[in-house]
Amino acid sequence: MTIALWCILIAALLPLVFTAVAKYGHEAGMRRLNRQPRVFQAELTGFRARAHWAHLNSIEAFPPFAAAVLVAQWVHAPQGRIDLLAVLFIALRLIYGAFYLSDRPQLRSLTWVLGLACMVGLFVVAALA
């Protein structure tokens, strides 16, 4: 299995990391409602709310990234380039999440754009194969 395919698995699991930050170790007075998770999520504030938003954005980013990797591999684009772009995407998504949690919107947006560029780059590499 290629590095890029492992990156798909990591990208699929990344939302769970952010939702764990949002849910566990919650501040005093906050109840975790597994029977009503949407109610619980709506009550989140501060970095826990931002962790939930990073979770949602990670879910949104996953399908086009997975498709880009699979398309690039399907057309037999250069594997080194595929792996590099996939690893960069994952690294940028982790940095993105850190910037989201620390409330750094400009840096968060920059890393989001760079991650998007990696995903688009995978399609470009595929188109040039």
Image (cartoon, rainbow, N blue to C red):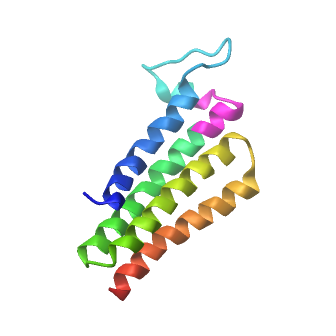
Counting from the top left corner in percent of width and height, residue 46 is at 72, 32
Residue 84, compared with residue 38, is above or below; it is below
Residue stretch in magenta: 41-51
Q: Is residue 23 left or right of residue 101?
A: left
Nearer to me, 56 or 83: 83
Counting from the top left corner in percent of width and height, residue 98 is at 64, 44
Q: Which corner quadrant of the image does residue 30 belong to?
A: top right
Task: Please identify the residue farthest to the front as the structure is shown.
Answer: 80
Q: Is residue 28 magenta?
A: no
Instruction: Look at the image and tell me in which quarter the N terminus lies.
Output: bottom left
Our reading of the magenta stretch's main secondary structure is helix
Residue depicted at x 61% and y 51% = 95
Q: Which corner quadrant of the image does residue 34 belong to?
A: top left
Counting from the top left corner in percent of width and height, residue 57 is at 53, 50
Residue depicted at x 40% and y 48% = 10
Residue depicted at x 46% and y 44% = 14
Instruction: Look at the image and tell me in which quarter the C terminus lies.
Output: bottom left
Counting from the top left corner in percent of width and height, residue 89 is at 50, 60
Residue 122, compared with residue 89, is above or below; it is below
Residue 77, compared with residue 1, is above or below; it is below
Q: Is residue 48 magenta?
A: yes
Residue depicted at x 41% and y 73% = 81
